[in-house]
Amino acid sequence: MNSQLPREINEIIIAKAKEFGASLAGFADPASLKNSPSYIARKDISFDHNFKVILVLALVHGESEPELDWGARKPYHTPGNRRLIEIGEELSSWLKKEYEIVSENIPYSTGKGGIFLKDAAAIAGLGIIGKNNLLITPEYGPRVRLSAMTINTTISSTEPSEFDPCSDCDMPCKNECPQGAFSEGDYNKTKCNIQMYIDEESIDAIKYCRKCEFSCPVGREI
């Protein structure tokens, strides 16, 4: 591994990720992710990775490209996911060639070595997890898809964001949810899953409900 990495290597990698097609990118500290809300809440899923650093990639997913999230029966291979995987592969090849840094895409499924992407993205400073239980970015609101890579060299993490759009929001997502997932105040995953199961019964392709995404005012102009 090249020991003479530029001081600004994290900025260089983020810029290159965007050049390859990512909309946003940031570095998450694995120790912080291990103690994130999702891992604390999900006692059945442990963080047992030895990652040195996690690079989180985001791809903007506006209303004009609904097919990015249309799922086939093969899980985790939506067009948006495939595009993010390709970005990660390009970036991995470039890191190896330019800096002798080894990196690889992290699987989507936590059962196959994946991580909680929203938590990782929040730790990496891409945005915050809002009242709608979605990652909300300053640039694009919740209308992003996520993936992550592991990079086997020490790189400083990007700082979590102080962005807080939900504090004074009247929660249009609450009014738009077809299953009333916010009817009791906090997000109710069980009610949300009812809609998810309905969507998965689609004959041609799974087209998940995104009403909470589209109703969020943050980044709507994008």
Image: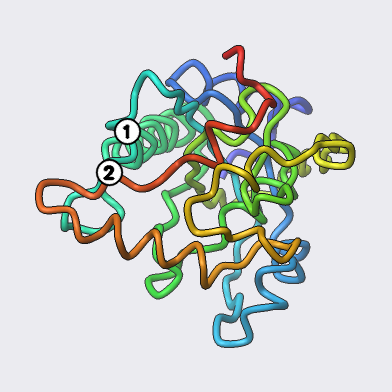
Instruction: Tell me the colour scheme of the image.
Output: rainbow
Q: Quadrant of residue 4?
A: top right
In depth, the one of 9 and 192 nearer the eye is 192
Task: Identify the image quadrant of the C terminus.
Answer: top right
189 horizontally vs 102: left or right: right
**Residue kind at label 1, given as amino acid type:** Leu
Residue 104 locus on image (x, y percent): 43, 49
160 horizontally vs 49: left or right: right
Disc number at residue 78?
Answer: 2
Q: Residue at x 56, y 42 (%)?
A: 176
Disc number at residue 105?
Answer: none
Mark 2 Cα-neighbour bin, 10 Å: few <14, some 14–19, many ≥20 = some
Residue 75 locus on image (x, y percent): 25, 59
Height in image: 35 above or below 182? below
- The residue labelled by disc 1 is 68
Height in image: 214 above or below 133? above
Q: Rounded to the nearest whole Å, what is the CA distance between mark 2 and mark 1?
A: 6 Å
Classify mark 2: helix, strand or loop: loop
Height in image: 186 above or below 105? below
Q: Quadrant of residue 46?
A: bottom right
Residue at the bottom extreme of this rendering: 44
Classify mark 1: helix, strand or loop: helix
Q: Residue at x 88, y 42 (%)?
A: 167
Task: Identify the image quadrant of the N terminus.
Answer: top right
Residue at the left extreme of this rendering: 204
Mark 2–mark 1 CB contact (< 8 Å) = yes
**Residue kind at label 2, given as amino acid type:** Thr
Q: Residue at x 20, y 60 (%)?
A: 201
Residue 192 locus on image (x, y percent): 50, 62
Q: Residue at x 61, y 20 (%)?
A: 220
Residue at the top extreme of this rendering: 221
